[in-house]
Image (tube, rainbow, N blue to C red):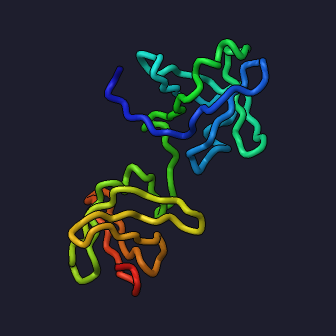
Amino acid sequence: MSDKQYFRVGKLVNTQGLRGEVRVIATTDFPEERFQPGSQLYLFHPTLQEPLRLTVASWRRHKGFELLKFEGYDSINDVEKWKGGELKVAEDELLELADDEYYIHQLIGCEVVTEEGEQLGRIVDVLQPGANDVWVVRGPRGEIYLPFIDDCIKQVDIEQKRVVCHLLEGLL
C-alpha cells in the first residue's frame, strides 16, 4: 500500500435488501458530496490486504442511514462480507473548507495556549455533541473542554499547529 493518507467518511454497518445496497453511518459533514453517484471511496476491512476502491452507483437516505450501492456489486452476496468496514477518502480528495473551518485531523496535536501565553496542552480529540464542536485539550491542568466558539477560540494556525484561546469562566 502507498503512503497515501485516508480519512473516514462512513462506517458500513449492514446490508439493505438483496441487490447489493449497504447501510452506512456517515462520519462526514458532506454526505451529499461524498456519496454522490460517481464518487470514489475506499473500503478498509480486516479481510482486505489493501483498500478496495469503490465507485458509488446510487445513494439515498433511509431511517437515519445512508444507503449506498457500488458499481459492479449487485447482490447481497457481494457486499455482506464488508459489514463493519470503514469507507474512506484519500487526502488529495478532501474538500476545500472555509477559512474558519478545519478537519479534525488538522486540529489533533495542536498546541493550545491562553491569550496570556499559558500552555494548556494539546488537542487530543474533537467532540461533536450538537450546537458546536468541543475540543478536548490534555495538558498540565488535566483535560480541558474548549467550545469551538468565537468567544473562546481566538486564533487557529494550522501551519504552526497552534491555537490561542480565551478561557471562559467555568472552563477549568
Kindly indicate the quadrant of the structure image that contains residue 125.
Answer: bottom left
Front-most of residues 132 and 71: 132
Percent position of residue 104, x then y: 43, 53
Seen in the image, is 100 located left or right of residue 139? right
Front-most of residues 15 and 150: 15
Kindly indicate the quadrant of the structure image that contains residue 171.
Answer: bottom left
Q: Quadrant of the C terminus?
A: bottom left
Percent position of residue 70, x then y: 67, 22
Taking the view exactly as shown, the residue that stands out farthest to the bottom is 169
Question: Does the image show residue 37?
Answer: no
Percent position of residue 54, x then y: 58, 22
Seen in the image, is 18 located left or right of residue 32? right
Q: Is residue 96 above or below residue 119?
A: above
Q: Residue at x 34, y 23 (%)?
A: 2
Q: Residue at x 47, y 77 (%)?
A: 150
Q: Residue at x 40, y 69 (%)?
A: 145
